[in-house]
Amino acid sequence: MSLVLLVVAGMLFAIGFHLLLQRSLVRVVVGFALLGHAANLALLLAGGPSGRPPLLGGKDPPGPGEMTDPLPQAMALTAIVITFGVTAFLLALAYRSWLFLGEDEVRDDLEDRRTEAEGGREERDEYGGTG
């Protein structure tokens, strides 16, 4: 069962990273959401087997297999909140971009291209290359 969940988490990470590298802002938002779900699943898998309580109220110290680690569950809850907030922010950015530009594609920045071209020209001059 854990192997299947690990494979699912790996697939979610792979698809999320692939979508995050696209130029469409909607795909970036979906990719970020998939990454958040993959991280939550990985955190829950790190917590140990399911069905065991995170805390025991008895006086005797519990054995190593009687309880789960509560820290991954707390981290998963925190990750859910952070993912929700960032996803809402990215959706707002994508909506504003679509509203002002009429498309959700990220364009190349002309200033970055000019700076890159000047950097390449200076590098060629420094090493005595042609071009």
Image (cartoon, rainbow, N blue to C red):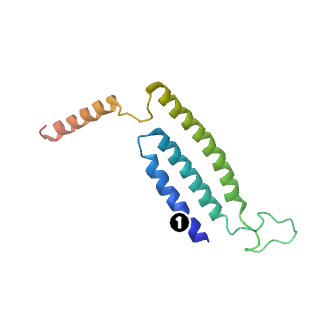
Q: Residue at x 62, y 55 (%)?
A: 40
**Is residue 74 or residue 17 the one in the foreground?**
17
**Is residue 78 or residue 97 the one in the foreground?**
97
Residue 44 figure quarter: bottom right
| Vertical position of residue 73 compared to residue 121: above or below | below
Label 1 neighbour load within 10 Å: few <14, some 14-19, many 20+ = few
Q: Position of residue 2 (x, y in %)?
A: 61, 70
| Vertical position of residue 10 compared to residue 118: above or below | below
Q: Residue at x 72, y 60 (%)?
A: 70
Under tag 1, what secondary structure?
A: helix
Tell me the residue that label 1 is attached to: 7
Is 23 left or right of 74, judged from the image as shown? left
- Number of callouts in the render? 1
| Vertical position of residue 51 compared to residue 40: above or below | below
Quick one: which residue is furthest to the front in this view? 102
Q: Position of residue 116 (x, y in %)?
A: 28, 35
Quick one: which residue is furthest to the right in this view? 59
Q: Residue at x 88, y 69 (%)?
A: 59
Q: Amino acid at mark 1?
A: Val
Quick one: which residue is furthest to the top in this view? 100
Q: Residue at x 67, y 67 (%)?
A: 48
Is 126 left or right of 84, judged from the image as shown? left
Quadrant into which the C terminus falls? top left
Is 74 left or right of 109, judged from the image as shown? right
Residue 68 figure quarter: bottom right
Quadrant into which the N terminus falls? bottom right
Is 92 left or right of 69, judged from the image as shown? left
Q: Position of residue 41 (x, y in %)?
A: 61, 59
